[in-house]
Amino acid sequence: MRWVIAFIVTANCVLAAPPLAPRKANHWPAQVFAPYVDTTLWPPFDFAGASKQHGIKFYTLAFVVAKGPNNPAPSWGGYHLVSKRWMLPEINAIRAGGGEVRVSFGGATGTGLASACKTPAQLQATYQAVINTYGLTHIDFDVEGHWLAETKSIERRSRAIVGLQAQARRSKRTLKVWYTLPVLPSGLTREGAGVLRSALRHRVDIAGVNIMAMNYGKAQAPKPTTHMGAYTIQAATSLHAQLKMLHREAGVQKTDAQLWAMVGLTPMLGHNDVKPETFTLGNAREVIAFARQKKIGLLSCWSANRDRPLAKPSANWASPKHTGIKQEVFGFSKIFRAYGGE
């Protein structure tokens, strides 16, 4: 059980305590390390231990999707309803320790809310319910797989986000919107760029674009065991050029520094899904040096759950619970956590 409900006993009845409320959100640094956490993976991620023992303060929580194809109720991974305030005790504890979270909608599996909700108004209201439940100031939209080509949900999402941002401005609240998209060393795919074109066409204020620097394939990554850091840096440089082009197309002027601040990098630690791609600790050092040089907005990884060595022999090349390589527990986070500041 994730929290204890206190009861007030009177002479004639038992009254439940008020529902748990979100603590006020903390400030996000201009540059930050915020690893992904797969919230539905078992055993549950130890946020308290990661924060207190390993200094991780900021997190990207994955993923909020529809409860089912015909059920647009927002849930964590299709399992735990947001309306039940699942994850709120953990989020409040992170905030109490000076940290903060952003929630990521979408991901590779399940039904995205942009598909399950049939109108922009319904979708906006659903997103807003999640924002309100957790008191969020930063949200992320992870668009991948066949959803990259699903035009109706892309357009519906863009219109809903514009509505969210307008509502936030009226309420004088902070709401930063990021996108997470697949990438090659040469940059965003045509479909990924199309997601951003839709957003900019509808006048979404994009805070940043986080790229999944992983699973490139042999043609794009001919040196997959040694050069994954270099491919990540190449992908980031390509993204920067694309962001400049896309904003210019939309009539929005951004300086180079502003565009670098919009760049987010998420490598897959250790073994990637595509054999034999392997992101090493040495690659991590290359990437953080680049991030510092360019002052990118976000450094992340997939995932904090995996940031540990292989405990026993496994037939799985890419496990959700370890990197598959020799390292200490939170070895990658020990390198990346030094990124950030005010």
Image (tube, rainbow, N blue to C red):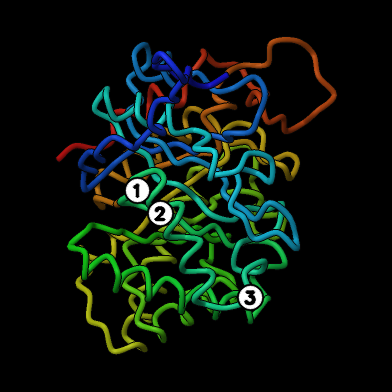
Query: Closer to the N terminus: mark 2 or mark 3?
Result: 3
Q: Secondary structure at mark 3?
A: loop
Closer to the observer: label 2 or label 1?
A: 1
- Crowding at mark 1 (Cα within 10 Å: few <14, some 14-19, many 20+): many
Q: Amino acid at mark 1?
A: Leu
Q: Quadrant of the C terminus?
A: top left
**Residue reaching furthest left?**
342
Identify the residue position indicated by label 1 in the image: 136
| Frontmost residue, 179 versus 81 | 81
Give coordinates of residue 36: x percent, y percent.
50, 38
Closer to the observer: label 1 or label 3?
A: 3
Residue positioned 26% across, 83% down in the render: 252
Q: Is residue 140 left or right of residue 25?
A: right
Q: Secondary structure at mark 2?
A: strand
Q: Secondary structure at mark 1?
A: loop
- The disc placed on residue 139 is 2
Residue positioned 27% across, 22% down in the render: 97
User: Do residues under tags 1 and 3 come within 8 Å of each other at their CB atoms?
Assistant: no
User: Do residues under tags 2 and 1 come within 8 Å of each other at their CB atoms?
Assistant: yes
Closer to the observer: label 2 or label 3?
A: 3
Identify the residue position indicated by label 3 in the image: 118
| Frontmost residue, 30 versus 175 | 175
- Crowding at mark 3 (Cα within 10 Å: few <14, some 14-19, many 20+): some
Report the Cα–Cα distance between label 2 and label 3: 21 Å
